[in-house]
Amino acid sequence: MPCKLSMRTSINLVISEPYITVEEFCRHTGYKEGTVRQMYRENRLPISKKEGLNGLIEINMVALTIEAAAYSEITMQA
């Protein structure tokens, strides 16, 4: 009797910090701070809700990871 094997690839993503500051994002990506702030102003980076006008900008790494996976041909299962 032939045996059917599943050849599904499994990828586990670990997100050590769900939110990081602009400065930390710059260290991770190599982007300049001005570039990251411009990306934020253009709504190209997902952030957590800010507290007031001068609140800390925290970039949502979970949303960025999901967005990156959506552009690849990976099927996500929760």
Image (cartoon, rainbow, N blue to C red):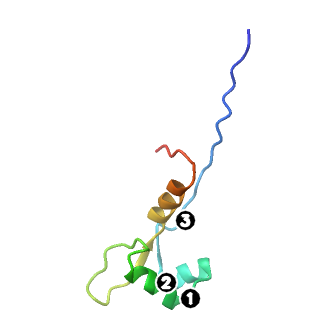
Q: Give the position of the N terminus as an image quadrant.
A: top right
Tell me the residue that label 3 is attached to: 16
The part of the image, by quadrant, that contains residue 30 is bottom right
Q: Secondary structure at mark 1?
A: loop
Viewer-nearest residue: 2 or 27: 2
Q: Earlier in the sequence, mark 3 or mark 1?
A: 3
Q: Residue at x 47, y 80 (%)?
A: 21
User: CB atoms at circles 2 and 1 under 8 Å apart?
Assistant: yes
Viewer-nearest residue: 13 or 37: 37
Are there few (<14), some (14-19), or many (20+) residues within 10 Å of tag 2? Answer: many
Tell me the residue that label 2 is attached to: 36
Q: Is residue 30 left or right of residue 58?
A: right
In the displayed orientation, state which residue is furthest to the right: 2
Identify the amino acid type marked 2. Answer: Val
Q: Is residue 12 left or right of residue 34?
A: right
Q: Position of residue 17 (x, y in %)?
A: 51, 68
Tell me the residue that label 1 is attached to: 32
